[in-house]
Amino acid sequence: MFTHLLLATDGSELAEVAVARGLQLAQALQADVTVVHVTPPVSVVVPAEAGLAFSEAAHQEGGARTAALIFERVEALAREHSVACRTVHVTGRRPADGIIQTADAKACDLIVVGSHGRRGLSRLTLGSQANEVAARTSVPVLIFGPLDRPSSATGAGGAGEYAQ
């Protein structure tokens, strides 16, 4: 079965659902966990056509602060599940690239991500990092969507519950 899970998060509510579910799975499997957050380059976040000037250094500094806050929350949740986790902050990469590279570098055998399940124009303009990861990696990908939200803050109930 799976022995090393990579949980990818951008700090959004949906990503936190995927992280909580991934921690439940890791606990049931007694698997190792690595959590990754990717701060893309400012050019990915703010296209040059927008005519706005953003400092890459300031953007990455903000990304580091965001990653620290995200990792603090994830580590607390991991302790609640009695799961040890390592954290990796990737900078200057598109999210899908950073997730795939981290999975390869850390020899993860399952990637867990959240997806908003966008369709139509919003999918074309906003993209789907989860779908891109699934399409480009040889590592299995477990994708949680909006319907996988747990019924409580601890992750009990809801779709996708794991039995030990």
Image (cartoon, rainbow, N blue to C red):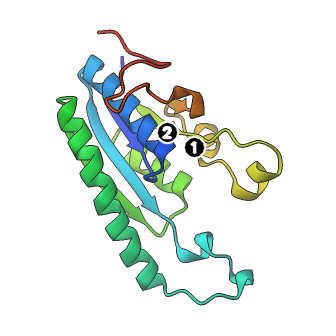
Report whether 82 appears left or right of 113.
Answer: left
The answer to whether 50 appears left or right of 137 in the picture is: right
Name the amino acid type tagged 2: Val
Q: 12 above or below 115?
A: below
The outermost residue toward the top is 164
Q: What residue is disc 2 on? A: 113
**Nearer to the camera, 130 or 102:** 130
Which residue is at 77% across, 42% downward? 119
**Vertical placement of 51 versus 6: above or below?**
below
What residue do we see at 34% from left, 9% from top? 163
Q: Position of residue 151 (x, y in %)?
A: 43, 25
When asked about the image quadrant of residue 107, the answer is: top left
At horizontal 37% and vertical 50% (from top left) the residue drawn is 36
Crowd band around label 1 with a 10 angstrom C-alpha radius: few (<14), some (14–19), many (20+) = many
Q: Determine which residue is flagged by label 1.
A: 133
Q: Is residue 126 above or below residue 29?
A: below
Q: Are marks 2 and 1 in contact (CB under 8 Å)?
A: yes
Which numbered circle lies on residue 151?
Answer: none
Tell me the distance, in whole angstroms, between the alpha carbons under discs 2 and 1. 9 Å
Label 2 neighbour load within 10 Å: few <14, some 14-19, many 20+: many
Question: In the picture, which quadrant includes the N terminus?
Answer: top left
Secondary structure of the residue carrying tag 2 is strand
* Residue type at tag 1: Val
* Residue 136 horizontal/vertical position (percent): 61, 43
Q: Please, is residue 157 above or below residue 9 in the view?
A: above
> Which quadrant: the C terminus?
top left
Residue 114 place in picture, x, y as percent? 52, 39
Q: Is residue 145 left or right of residue 8?
A: right
Secondary structure category for the residue under label 1: helix
Q: State the residue at coordinates (59%, 40%).
A: 115
